[in-house]
């Protein structure tokens, strides 16, 4: 899901880009970036039991190479 990051009343909010109008100052995160960020979160917080084994293995390989 593409998202917009927006500050509202001093709080950073993540909004669905499809259901929100663009406003000045928004940071747009497309589907690809959102997916990459979510995969990193899932790897770092495996205790919440959300995993995609193929992507976790690929990400670990990439991280080991860098």
Image (cartoon, grey):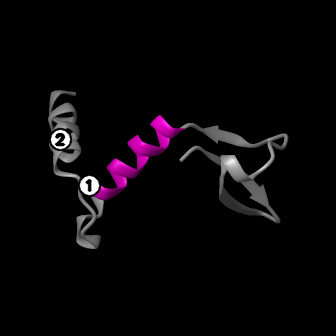
Vertical placement of residue 8 versus 52, above or below? below
The mark tally for this picture is 2
Looking at this rendering, what residue extends furthest in the front direction? 18
Placement of the C terminus among the 4 image quadrants? top left
The picture quadrant where one finds residue 36 is top left
* Callout 2: SS: helix
Q: Position of residue 41 (x, y in %)?
A: 36, 55
Q: Which residue is mark 1?
A: 43
Residue 49 or 25: which is nearer the viewer?
Answer: 49
Q: Are the two marked residues, 2 and 1, in contact with CB atoms closer than 8 angstroms?
A: yes
Q: Position of residue 57 (x, y in %)?
A: 15, 43
Looking at this rendering, what residue extends furthest in the bottom direction? 48
The picture quadrant where one finds residue 30 is top right
Specify the segment rendered in magenta. Answer: 31-42
Q: Which mark is residue 11?
A: none
Residue 45 or 2: which is nearer the viewer?
Answer: 2
Left or right: 16, with 1 as reference point: right
The picture quadrant where one finds residue 48 is bottom left
Residue occupying the point 16% across, 27% down: 65
- Label the magenta part by its dominant secondary structure: helix
Q: Position of residue 17 (x, y in %)?
A: 67, 47
Task: Decide whether residue 61 is among the magenta residues.
Answer: no
* Callout 1: SS: helix
Task: Decide whether residue 32 is among the magenta residues.
Answer: yes
Residue occupying the point 84% across, 40% down: 24
Left or right: 64, with 38 as reference point: left
Crowding at dot 1, Cα within 10 Å, few <14 / some 14-19 / many 20+, comes out as: many
Task: Compute the Cα span from label 2 to label 1.
Answer: 9 Å
Give whichever of discs 2 and 1 has the lower sequence position.
Answer: 1
Q: Which residue is mark 2?
A: 60
Residue occupying the point 65% across, 39% down: 28
């Amino acid at each position: 899901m593409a998202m917009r990051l927006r500050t509202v009343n001093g709080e950073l909010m993540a909004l669905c880009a499809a259901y929100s109008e663009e406003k000045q100052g928004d940071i747009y995160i497309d589907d690809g970036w959102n997916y990459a960020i979510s995969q990193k979160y899932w790897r770092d917080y495996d205790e919440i039991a959300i995993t995609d084994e193929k992507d976790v293995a690929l990400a670990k390989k990439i991280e080991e190479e860098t």
